[in-house]
Amino acid sequence: MPERDLVKTGIAGLDDILAGGLLRGSVVLVEGTAGTGKTTLGVEFIYRGAAEFDEPGVIVLFEVSPDKLVRDAALFGWDLPALERQGRLKIVFTTRQVFQQEVQQADSLLLDEAAAIGARRIFVDGLVPRTTGDSDTRRNTPEAFHLLAEGLQRERLTAMLGVEVAGSPDARLGASLPEEFIADTVIQLRTESMERAVQRSIEIVKARGQDYRMGRHSFSIVDGKGIEVYRRVQAPRDSLREEAAAFDPSTRVTTGVPGLDDLMGGGLFLGSTTLVVGITGSGKSVMALQYVAEGARLGERSIMLTLDEPRAQMLRNAATVGIDLKPSIDRGLVRLVYDRPQEIEIDRHFLELEKIVKEFRPQRAVIDSLSTYGSSLGPTGRSFRDFFHAVVALMKEHQVTTIYNHENPELLGMSSVMGPYGVSSLVDNVVLLNWVELGDTFRQALTIAKMRANAFDRTTRECEIVNGHGMRVLPREIPPGATRRLAFWEYFGLVARSPERHPPSGILGSRP
Amino acid sequence: MAAQLIDAAGLRDACDLDLLLFFSRHPHVVLSSEQLAAYVGYELAQVARALDRLLETGLLRRTLNQGAPGRMYVLEVGDATGWLEPLRQVCATPDGRNALKGLLKQRQSQSGDSSNRGFSGARSS
């Protein structure tokens, strides 16, 4: 199969969804309403070509004056005048009518100028499609567009054409612009309302002769950088990820919680996925911190990803249970990652997580908490489930033993592990943390509800969190000399919210 | 300072000034004469005279293509950097631009001279 000559756009994330770049010599239509980012995309395409890939380019403007374009480009750190002085860029101001005529002529002034600098790319900003019955002469007819496309292809320029559309593509109810049939590649830019926020998205609708990632991917326009495209979280990744082993049943990872590893037959399996479920205050975060601290003690790298608490708060929480994470952070063993849950851009968030996992190569991870992701994305929508699938697959590919905290709203006992989230089938292990009311006291209970491919202790065990010391699972028997109270084994129905004492031994039998 | 800039640039009237400013903002254009006049906002004849003056000084280069309505104009800044940028900065505000236009109008009525003294252009120091 002949190798395709692909032109890298150089725009962060865009070449990835184009499966490498644009076919050389393509005519690329970039559609969008006002303010969707067409000009920024086109200018960056030309800038990167000239500055990074030794491909001089031409920018043709009908509406924006060149000095404003130069001023706006400077916000991204793009020095267009410098490229002009070096003969790698030309910015030409003209009218649509003149441009149309120029491109159709073999001895065109404009194309001669492009040839003079060895231009390989061109961006034309501000084409306006004409629809049937439209008498506005500013707008291109399909025939005129066809001639324009032919002219550009004759010069073997990879051409990006910014096309202003009146309404969003969705409002057209699937009807295509005539220009879309002529162009080789069609890219649609949108700004979509999400509650009170606005999210930008980019979609490759068509790419003749090449592969691309379908669907809407989110993107941002970032000061000092330009456009950043975030491949949508649902998009298939490397096939290796889909084929990654579930976990390594020959290797254990210790939890760092005294008494817990014994219940698990020695600890978690390497690369396994564990859900820790409990109401607020039941000890999920403490358990997570001990897990991370244990990793640091063993020289294993951990990441702790949270939407709930900023970094400083996490360090403070750790200190209250006697864990000082700062030295481990300074040694590069622990990485705390916080992202704001409000209006979270899930594609960007996942891409950053992927990057961290690939670069930092953690052996352990804590995600705190799934319920916050659920409330940001909606627990019953596809987004949350797709995100969780993607994170689980990512962690398994890299054999990261991961704990996911999840807040269950039920104060006493649990009628359902994950409520409306419904993804518990994806996890290998489930640990339940409950409050149990015995007499006039709330006591903490821990139950291992599930452990794939592993024999484990199914009894509900008491645990405690002691300031400065963290969590530990208590022995089943109350040690002699300890404060007088009944052990958990003397009750039944602990997690079922109505604990009752077993009859005293000697009447109906001995302890269970 | 305004007078010095006018002298350095060799400006004669407001059309000269506005045409020069247009090309400083659009250093590379392909336009027909009528379109250029429309963008600058003067009568075609005025713009044509101002264009000729600019071309004579070498500040502007024009390329024609027979049969095509558009002409390519490229601003060749060269030695004019010393006065062009200060001129742009003065004209960046309405007050600055109006001050220069006022001075040009005053000079025109004082000289009562419709001679072809025009842009001194890029080559003068």
Image: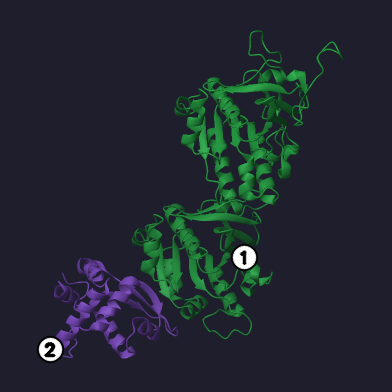
Chain colours: A green, B purple
Query: Is A316 situated above or below A88?
Result: above
Query: Is A224 situated above or below B25?
Result: above
Q: Respond whether the residues carrying marks 2 and 1 are from the same subunit.
A: no
Residue A167 numbered mark, or none: none
In this orientation, does residue A333 appear? no
The amino acid type found where label 2 is placed reads Ser
Whether label 2 touches label 1, CB < 8 Å = no
Nearest to the observer: residue A204 or residue A356 = A356
Location of residue A307 in the rendering, given as x and y in whole percent from the top left corner: 56, 41
Location of residue A492 in the rendering, given as x and y in whole percent from the top left corner: 78, 24
The amino acid type found where label 1 is placed reads Asp
Residue ID at (58%, 41%):
A354
User: Does residue A462 appear left or right of residue A25 in this picture?
Assistant: right
Q: What is the chain letter for disc 1? A: A
Reading the image, the residue beneath label 2 is B111
Nearest to the observer: residue A416 or residue A332 = A416
Residue ID at (71%, 31%):
A430
Query: Is A435 situated above or below A173?
Result: above
Quarter residue A253 falls in: top right
Residue ID at (86%, 13%):
A507
**How many residues crowd around disc 2 within 10 Å: few (fewer than 14), some, or many (20 or more)?**
few
Quarter residue A246 falls in: top right
Q: What is the chain letter for disc 2? A: B
User: Does residue A74 appear left or right of residue B119 in this picture?
Assistant: right
Viewer-side label of 2, 1 = 2
Quarter residue A462 falls in: top right
Residue A184 numbered mark, or none: 1
Name, please, the residue furthest toward the front.
A440
In this orientation, does residue A53 appear? yes
Q: For numbered disc 2, what is the local secondary structure?
A: helix
